[in-house]
Image (cartoon, helix red, strand yellow):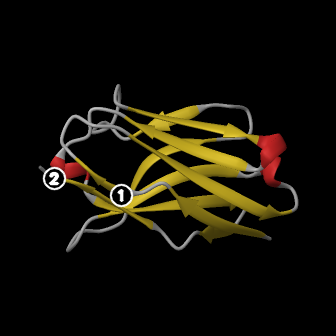
Amino acid sequence: QVQLVESGGGLVQPGGSLRLSCAASGSSFSIYTMGWYRQAPGKQRELVAVINIGGTINYADSVKGRFTISRTNSKKMVYLQMNNLKPEDTAVYYCNGRIGTMTFWGQGTQVTVSS
């Protein structure tokens, strides 16, 4: 089982950058597919980016070229570098870990993009 804790959210102006971090505890982190999801008010939770154990990465079309997901297995960390942020990126961002049929979520961190 994996416990996930996000950090790094906050208020940023349009065009700015933030780096989200997700700290994992528990065993077998390196074999989990890790991802970032977000949920804006009144909308469904959506995938932002995912990285599997082989390093294959997928991004939502809306963030391609602006966001970068990475992981450091030795530190049990997953990151989301967000550049050129837009107001529509405003949401609660959740870290997700998945292996087989098991899925784990962090508590979320708020990202607000506003001038």
Q: Earlier in the sequence, mark 1 or mark 2?
A: 1
Q: Is residue 53 above or below residue 29?
A: above
Q: Is residue 64 left or right of residue 20?
A: left
Where is residue 9 drawn, in percent x and y?
41, 57
* The disc label shown at residue 104, or none: none
Q: Is residue 57 left or right of residue 62?
A: right
Q: Is residue 76 above or below residue 99?
A: above
Residue under pointer 1: 10
Confirm whether residue 81 shows in the render: yes
Name the residue furthest top: 65
Where is residue 69 drawn, in percent x and y?
53, 37
Q: Residue shown at 63%/50% (left/top)? A: 34
Q: Residue shown at 80%/53% (left/top)? A: 29
Quadrant for the N terminus, please. Answer: bottom right
Where is residue 80 drawn, in percent x and y?
50, 42
Badge 1, how many Cα within 10 Å: few under 14, some, many 20+?
Answer: some
Badge 2, how many Cα within 10 Å: few under 14, some, many 20+?
Answer: some
Between residue 100 and residue 2, name the one nearer to us.
Answer: 2
Check disc 1 and give the amino acid type. Gly
Q: Is residue 71 left or right of residue 111?
A: right
Q: Residue shown at 73%/32% (left/top)? A: 54
Between residue 61 and residue 112, name the one nearer to us.
Answer: 112
Residue under pointer 2: 114
Check disc 2 and give the amino acid type. Ser
Where is residue 76 drawn, in percent x and y?
76, 50
Q: Residue shown at 66%/41% (left/top)? A: 52
Name the secondary structure under disc 1: strand
Name the secondary structure under disc 2: loop
Q: Is residue 88 above or below residue 108?
A: above
Q: Is residue 103 above or below residue 34?
A: below
Between residue 86 and residue 30, name the one nearer to us.
Answer: 86
Task: State how far apart marks 1 and 2 are (Cα).
Answer: 11 Å
